[in-house]
Amino acid sequence: MLRGLTTISFWAADLAAAKQWYTELLGIGPYFERPNPDGSLAYMEFRLGDYQHELGVIDSRYSPHASATAPAGAIVYWHVDDVPATLAKLLSMGAKEHQAPIDRGAGFITASVVDPFGNVLGIMYNPHYLEVLGLTKKA
């Protein structure tokens, strides 16, 4: 069955701007890019985090769904060590608050933003993530 996240796909009408924005946010450039027939960027992929999860950003022309009028759908939460500091950085880069930080109890804190391209980006301090990471580093 489900074994783990492989690629999370975001959409953007302006991939050049998305490339610049995500490169600044993540501190790394995409490791893979695919051009459109006209030479413009169609797709890019970043590998990030402890498990090298993939974040793909795709030209919104290829979206399988009609454009929504507002951000919607499932929210993927990325573990961060400091939710308030990460949220502040995202907001300073032009993201808009989607959901203010919420203390979910037992050490879990979540928040989310809408990136400048209309995607919902979730951030979370997650003690379980750190436990699993600790176990994999011992193995």
Image: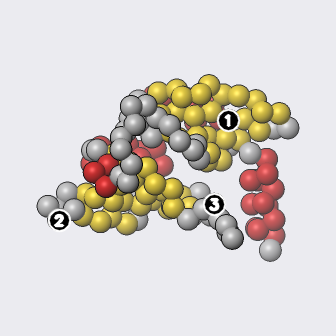
Q: Quadrant of the N terminus?
A: bottom right
Q: Name the residue tied to disc 2.
A: 37
Q: Furthest residue to the left?
A: 38
Residue at which label 3 appears: 50
Q: Amino acid at mark 3?
A: Asp
Q: Give the CA separation, mark 3 to mark 2.
A: 34 Å
Nearest-to-viewer mark from 1 and 2: 2
Q: Is residue 90 left or right of residue 21?
A: right
Q: Residues within 10 Å of mark 3 (few under 14, many from 20)?
A: few
Residue on which the image places disc 1: 110
- Real-space Cα separation, disc 3 to disc 1, in angstroms: 19 Å
Report how far apart the C-alphas of labels 1 and 2 lie in the structure: 40 Å
Element type at mark 2: loop
Nearer the observer: mark 3 or 1; the answer is: 1
Amino acid under disc 2: Pro
Q: Nearer the viewer, mark 3 or mark 2?
A: 2
Q: How is the image coloured?
A: secondary structure
Name the residue: 37% across, 66% down.
32
In this view of the protein, can residue 115 be seen by the observer?
no
Residue at figure coordinates x 76%, y 68% from the top left: 136
Residue 113: x %, y % from top left? 52, 33
Q: Earlier in the sequence, mark 1 or mark 2?
A: 2
